C-alpha cells in the first residue's frame, strides 16, 4: 500500500474528517436503512424463490440478519442521545458488526462458490444482487470506534493512515466499496487539548486522539525533568470513554522481520460531545458524491419501421421483422425490397415484409 505520512497536513485533515464521519449518527443511520433494505430482500428470496432453481438462500441466516437490524435500532437510539458506549465490546454496534461478518461469510455457502468460509468465485446473478444490497451497508473503517480488547498485544484500530486513505483498501476480491468524497475545504485539525494518557490508561472522554512519543529533557543526561517535545507515532484513532488506551505498531525490526508493538502517549485532539443535546446536526457533507463530467450529445432520431415498397428513410443495414437472419443494406431514398423465402420444397416465394433499421451508416447520420 502507498504510505501516507501523518506529518502531512492534508493527510491529517483527511484522517480527522474520516474518523468524525465513521462515528457520526448519520452514517450509522444510513447503515441501518441500507441493512433493512437487504433484510427485506433476503426474506423475500427465502420465501419466493422457486425450489426448482438451483440458487437458494439459507433460511437459517434470517434470525441473525434480523438481529443485526435490531442491534442497529438499539444503537441508534443510544447514539441519538450522545451515548457512545454502543461501540464497546458486546454493545449494540459492536455486536451488529460482528454478526454482519457472520452473515457475509455464510451468505451463500454453495460449494461451487464458497470454501471454508471464503468466497471462491463470483456469485450467480440473483445471489450477487442480494450481495450488492448487503455490501451497501458496509464502510471501510466502520470499526473505528470499537473497543480494542485489553491485553499486551492490543493495538489501535488504525496504526497507519493508508488503512483509511489508500484506494486499494476499498477494493476486495469480488466487490468494491465506495471511496469517500471529501468536502472542500477541509478544516484544520484542532491543536491538542492538553489531555494526555498512556497505553493501558482508562480513556477519560470520547474523541479523536493522536499517538505520540514524548521526549523528556535530562539534567546532565541522566535525570528526566519534564516533557520537552512530542512526535507523531502513527494514525489518529477514535477511542471511546472507559476503554483502555491501546498500543501502536512501532518501527520495522529488521532482525525479527516484523514491526514490534510499542506503548505510546495519546493526546486528545477533539472531544466528541455531538448529540448530547438531543439534536442531530446537519451532516450531509459525509455523503458527497463525485461530480460526473458529461457533455450533451444530440440523440439519434428514431427511424420508424418501413414495409416492402416504401421509401427507405435512412441509409444502413435493415433487418426483416420476424426473420432476423435476413439483412440488407439500403440507401436512403431507395425502395425497400421484398423478401424471397424458400419453402419445404426448396421453391422460393416472395414475401412482403416489414423492415427495421439494425445499424445506420455513420456517414449518413
Image (cartoon, helix red, strand yellow):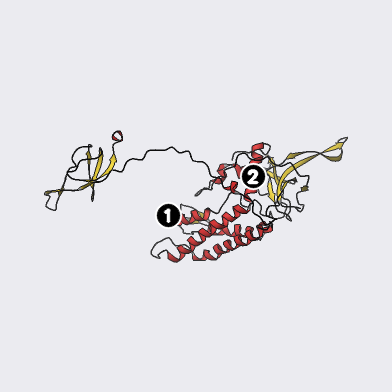
Res 135 visible = yes
First in sequence: mark 1 vs mark 2 = 2
In the image, taking residue 223 as reference, residue 134 lies left or right, namely left
How many numbered callouts?
2
Disc 2, SS = helix
Which numbered circle lies on residue 125? 1
Percent position (x, y) of residue 188? 68, 39
Residue 227 relative to residue 363: left or right: right
Asked whether residue 155 appears in the rendered view, the answer is: no
Locate residue 226, reporting x and y percent: 84, 40
User: Which residue position holds label 2?
Assistant: 17
Farthest residue, direction top: 363
Judging depth in this view, the residue of 323 and 159 nearest the camera is 323
- The residue that appears at 39% across and 62% down in the rendered structure is 53
Name the spot of residue 170 as percent of width and height, x first.
55, 46
Residue at point 31%, 43% (across, down): 302
Q: Mark 1, mark 2: which one is toward the viewer?
A: 2
Q: Seen in the image, is 187 located left or right of residue 64? A: right
Q: Secondary structure at mark 1?
A: helix
Residue at (78% x, 41% y) in the render: 214
Mark 1, other Cα within 10 Å: few <14 / some 14–19 / many ≥20: few
Tag 1 and tag 2, C-beta contact below 8 Å: no
Front-lying residue, 217 or 207: 207
Q: CA distance from mark 1 to mark 2?
A: 36 Å
- Horizontal side of 357 relative to 214 (left or right) equals left
From the viewer's side, name the closer residue of 350 and 147: 350
Amino acid at each position: 500500500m502507498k504510505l501516507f505520512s501523518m506529518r502531512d497536513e492534508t493527510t491529517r485533515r483527511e484522517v480527522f474528517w474520516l474518523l468524525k464521519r465513521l462515528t457520526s449518527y448519520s452514517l450509522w443511520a444510513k447503515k441501518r436503512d441500507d441493512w433493512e433494505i437487504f433484510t427485506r430482500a433476503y426474506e423475500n428470496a427465502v420465501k419466493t424463490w422457486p425450489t426448482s432453481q438451483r440458487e437458494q438462500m439459507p433460511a437459517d441466516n434470517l434470525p441473525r440478519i434480523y438481529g443485526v437490524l435490531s442491534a442497529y435500532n438499539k444503537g441508534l437510539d443510544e447514539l441519538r442521545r450522545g451515548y457512545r458506549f454502543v461501540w464497546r465490546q458486546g454493545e449494540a454496534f459492536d455486536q451488529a458488526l460482528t454478526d454482519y461478518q457472520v452473515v457475509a461469510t455464510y451468505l451463500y455457502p454453495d460449494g461451487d462458490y464458497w470454501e471454508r468460509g471464503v468466497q471462491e468465485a463470483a456469485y450467480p446473478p440473483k445471489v450477487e444482487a442480494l450481495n450488492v444490497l448487503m455490501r451497501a451497508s458496509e464502510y471501510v473503517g466502520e470499526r473505528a470506534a470499537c473497543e480494542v480488547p485489553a491485553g499486551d498485544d492490543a493495538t489501535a484500530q488504525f496504526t497507519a493512515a493508508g488503512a483509511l486513505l489508500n484506494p486499494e483498501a476499498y477494493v476486495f476480491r469480488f466487490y468494491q466499496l465506495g471511496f469517500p468524497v471529501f468536502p472542500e475545504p477541509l478544516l484544520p485539525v484542532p491543536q491538542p487539548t492538553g489531555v494526555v494518557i498512556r497505553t493501558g490508561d482508562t480513556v477519560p472522554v470520547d474523541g479523536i486522539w493522536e499517538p505520540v512519543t514524548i521526549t523528556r529533557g535530562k539534567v546532565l543526561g541522566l535525570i528526566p525533568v519534564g516533557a520537552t517535545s512530542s512526535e507523531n507515532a502513527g494514525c489518529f484513532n477514535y477511542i471511546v470513554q472507559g476503554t483502555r488506551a491501546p498500543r501502536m505498531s512501532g518501527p520495522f525490526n529488521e532482525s525479527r522481520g516484523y514491526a514490534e508493538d510499542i506503548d505510546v502517549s495519546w493526546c486528545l485532539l477533539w472531544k466528541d460531545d455531538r448529540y448530547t443535546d438531543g439534536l442531530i446536526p446537519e451532516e450531509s457533507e459525509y455523503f458527497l458524491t463525485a461530480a460526473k463530467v458529461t457533455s450533451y450529445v444530440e440523440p439519434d432520431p428514431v427511424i420508424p419501421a418501413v414495409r416492402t415498397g416504401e421509401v427507405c428513410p435512412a441509409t444502413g443495414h435493415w433487418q426483416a421483422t420476424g426473420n432476423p437472419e435476413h439483412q440488407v443494406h439500403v440507401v436512403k431514398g431507395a425502395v425497400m425490397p421484398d423478401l424471397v423465402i424458400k419453402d419445404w420444397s426448396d421453391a422460393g416465394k416472395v414475401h412482403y415484409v416489414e423492415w427495421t433499421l439494425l445499424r445506420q451508416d455513420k456517414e449518413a447520420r
